[in-house]
Image (cartoon, rainbow, N blue to C red):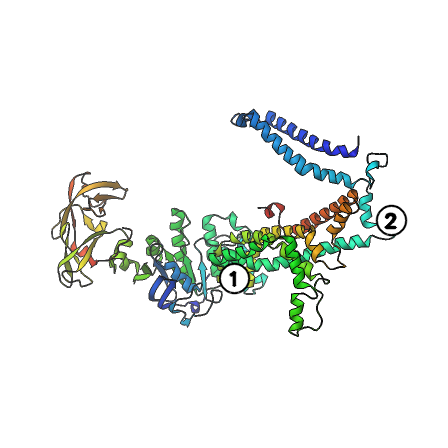
């Protein structure tokens, strides 16, 4: 599967807007995916990520803006002429063709001779660990094997960009986790650009070099996984990626680094990267693993009541009354040695203000 | 016992065999968890169901055909001589298709009518496929739902018009002094009118038109269930449009195509009205020959023999085609 390094091509979206009638599926998306990058679009269903993928692959034309692949404007170039290959959510393998015929279909339509096709099929089958299974029917394969055949079929045409539309969503959890590692290693082996669409943050965080988080057709943030998790740019990203406790309120006082929010739980302190001013509506985010069920020196503290406890083996989730809003979650690790209060007991929650994050008020995910 | 009464014994024997099989099966593998037929339905209803099904199968399906089969193996006789000493089993009616009973050479009139009917039906089937495939594909995969509904309406409504009216209005269009010739001559495109009806253009148009729906619905059903992603996957892998049809759509829709083609072919070969009204003056359709035996010569024996020749030929041709295109009979009726 190794390919020439020249085969790398970046993908540029230049103010791309896609409309379906009155509905705007993608609003003014601008981004620059580098050649050889593993790039993910992450967002809930209906956020426009599949529309972006279809625009890159050529099945949709942008209503406004330009798509460039390897610096070349793709306007007017159909999906069969683009240097991209798409792996469909349901894989869309051809059920009436054998495994080898599936894999070499792209070569067949390019007029590659039968002998060369067979040779290439055998190489690819070897690489996806299905040697000698070219004559099988697709229906005889397991889910994971079908997955690998779909990847081989796409790679057989030596695309410069591989587009993947939630290809793991049909697999069971174990296989999904295994395929994550496999996809990542295939990408590193092949060295071409992978653009991956998913609503599963775990997939996006583990595999991607960079992630674009989308909501309602708008790209909220483009960053690597660590930054998306630790430095979310908007309230949506903070609430969509990973678990997060949100406390809405008004900024009481603020400086360049910290802000204090007036909330139903009293004044709460957190970092202020967006430079909010006093009087602004804002939301303070504290991750469950950043909070503790104890009072701490120099920490911000609030009090609530334990509603529920979920023991998960390596950690325990404690759910506390959120004063009419979503429950506050505190995750207690085993090595913390902290005692866990009983259900119904009053409890103090504290966190290091450096781990609290104040962001402008905005839409939250799955409220 | 006369051979004709055999007809009534055959079904009884078949029923007896089935009944015996059911008895044996029950004795060999009694399934206590399963209630018996009469326990489930009660005696009265159970008997009523059996009688109804038996009546339908026997009197409406099996007996008429069996009677015709037997009839075709009898000589042509006046009613008085039926059942008499001359009424023996014979292959004469089938022979008469090849060699006329009056003697002298081969029966070219009928053989030609037969071959032409089969050939023309194949042509009609091909025309219908060429017209219907793009339309069915558009309706099933490409068209917006509203437009598809409109097309469906446009396809179905013309069939409210009865066949005679349709056939004669086509005559009006295609006649030597008909609308099309008048327009063509008037516009100076041709000097002398074209004899569409004499050239059997009317026959092909009329038959194709008559069985358009029979082709389009199996195609539409087959193509509609094709996953759109399959088409897009082929396109994404670089296939031009015609390859997508050749490699993905047509193989997938093959059972539907086979079903539509089989039905159009069978219906055309057995058509009576359209060939009679729209065929040229020198054109003899095989069903017209059969019709004449039944209703003009009152020669039921020869008529039924000819009808079975047609039936056997059609079935044989269809089976060969199905085998050639590797479709099983079961798939075509899915």
CA neighbours of label 1 inside 10 A, class few (<14), some (14 to 19), many (20+): many
B324 relative to A297 in the view: left or right: right
Q: Is residue B60 above or below residue A31?
A: above
Left or right: where does residue A342 sit relative to residue A136?
Answer: left
Q: Nearer the viewer, residue B200 or B137?
A: B200
Marks counted in the figure total 2
Residue A270, above or below A302: below
> Which residue is label 2 attached to?
B102
Q: Look at the image and tell me whether residue B87 can be seen.
A: no
Q: Secondary structure at mark 1?
A: helix
Of the 4 image quadrants, the one containing the N terminus of chain B is top right
Q: Position of residue B123 (x, y in %)?
A: 68, 58
Task: Say if A16 sits above or below B292 in the image.
Answer: below
Q: Chain of mark 1?
A: A
User: Which circle marks residue A106 in the picture?
Assistant: 1
**Which of the two residues, A363 or A319, is positioned nearer the viewer here?**
A363
**For residue A285, what is the image quadrant?**
bottom left
Q: CA distance from mark 2 to mark 1?
A: 66 Å
Q: Residue at x 52, y 47 (%)?
A: A140
Q: Is residue B250 visible?
A: yes
Residue in the picture at 21% in, 51% down: A290
């Amino acid at each position: 599967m190794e390919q020439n390094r020249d085969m790398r091509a970046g993908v540029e979206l230049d103010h791309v807007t896609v409309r379906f009638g009155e509905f705007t599926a993608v609003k003014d998306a601008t981004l620059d995916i580098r050649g050889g990058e593993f790039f993910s679009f992450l967002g809930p269903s209906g956020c426009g990520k599949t529309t972006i993928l279809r625009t890159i692959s050529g099945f949709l034309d942008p209503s406004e803006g330009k798509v460039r692949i390897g610096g070349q404007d793709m306007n007017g170039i159909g999906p069969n002429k683009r240097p991209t290959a798409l792996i469909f959510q349901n894989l869309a393998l051809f059920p009436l063709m054998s495994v080898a015929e599936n894999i070499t279909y792209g070569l067949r339509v390019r007029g590659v001779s039968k002998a060369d096709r067979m040779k290439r099929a055998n190489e690819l089958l070897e690489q996806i660990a299905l040697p000698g299974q070219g004559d099988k029917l697709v229906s005889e394969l397991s889910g994971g094997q079908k997955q690998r055949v779909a990847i081989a079929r796409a790679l057989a045409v030596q695309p410069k960009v591989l587009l993947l539309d939630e290809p793991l969503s049909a697999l069971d959890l174990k296989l999904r986790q295994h395929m994550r590692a496999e996809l990542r290693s295939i990408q590193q082996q092949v060295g071409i650009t992978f653009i991956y669409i998913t609503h599963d943050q775990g997939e996006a965080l583990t595999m991607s070099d960079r992630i674009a988080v989308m909501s309602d057709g708008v790209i909220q943030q483009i960053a690597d996984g660590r930054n998306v998790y630790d430095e979310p740019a908007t309230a949506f990203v903070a609430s969509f990626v990973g678990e997060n406790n949100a406390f809405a309120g008004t900024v009481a006082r603020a400086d360049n680094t910290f802000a204090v929010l007036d909330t139903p739980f009293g004044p709460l302190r957190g970092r202020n990267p967006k430079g909010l001013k006093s009087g602004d509506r804002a939301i303070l985010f504290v991750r469950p693993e950043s909070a503790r069920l104890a009072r701490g020196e120099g920490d911000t503290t609030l009090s609530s009541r334990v509603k529920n406890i979920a023991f998960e083996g390596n950690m325990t989730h404690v759910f506390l009354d959120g004063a009419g809003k979503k429950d506050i979650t505190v995750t207690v690790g085993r090595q913390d040695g902290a005692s866990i209060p009983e259900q119904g007991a009053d409890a103090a929650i504290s966190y290091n203000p450096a781990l609290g994050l104040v962001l402008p008020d905005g839409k939250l995910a799955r409220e | 016992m006369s051979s004709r009464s055999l007809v009534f014994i055959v079904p009884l024997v078949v029923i007896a065999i089935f009944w015996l099989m059911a008895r044996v099966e029950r004795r060999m593998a009694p399934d206590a968890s399963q209630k018996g037929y009469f326990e489930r339905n009660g005696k009265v209803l159970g008997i009523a169901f059996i009688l109804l099904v038996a009546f339908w199968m026997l009197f409406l399906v099996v007996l008429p055909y069996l009677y015709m089969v037997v009839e075709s193996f009898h000589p042509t006789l006046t009613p008085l001589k039926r059942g008499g000493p001359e009424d023996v089993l014979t292959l004469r009616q089938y022979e008469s298709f090849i060699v006329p009973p009056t003697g002298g050479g081969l029966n070219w009139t009928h053989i030609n009518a037969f071959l032409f009917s089969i050939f023309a039906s194949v042509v009609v089937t091909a025309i219908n496929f060429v017209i219907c495939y793009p339309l069915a594909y558009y309706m099933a995969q490409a068209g917006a739902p509203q437009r598809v509904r409109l097309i469906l309406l446009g396809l179905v409504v013309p069939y409210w018009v009865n066949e005679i009216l349709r056939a004669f209005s086509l005559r009006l269009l295609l006649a030597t002094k008909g609308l099309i010739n008048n327009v063509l001559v008037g516009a100076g495109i041709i000097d002398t009118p074209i004899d569409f009806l004499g050239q059997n253009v009317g026959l092909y148009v009329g038959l194709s038109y008559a069985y358009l729906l029979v082709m389009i619905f199996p195609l539409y059903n087959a193509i509609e269930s094709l996953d759109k992603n399959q088409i897009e996957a082929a396109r994404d892998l670089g296939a031009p449009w015609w390859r997508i049809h050749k490699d993905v759509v047509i193989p997938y829709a093959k059972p539907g195509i086979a079903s539509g083609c089989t039905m159009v072919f069978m219906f055309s070969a057995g058509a009576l009205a359209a060939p009679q009204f729209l065929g040229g003056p020198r054109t003899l359709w095989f069903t017209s020959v059969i019709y004449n035996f039944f209703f003009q010569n009152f020669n039921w024996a020869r008529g039924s023999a000819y009808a079975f020749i047609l039936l056997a030929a059609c079935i044989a041709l269809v089976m060969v085609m199905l085998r050639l295109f590797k479709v099983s009979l079961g798939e075509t009726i899915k």
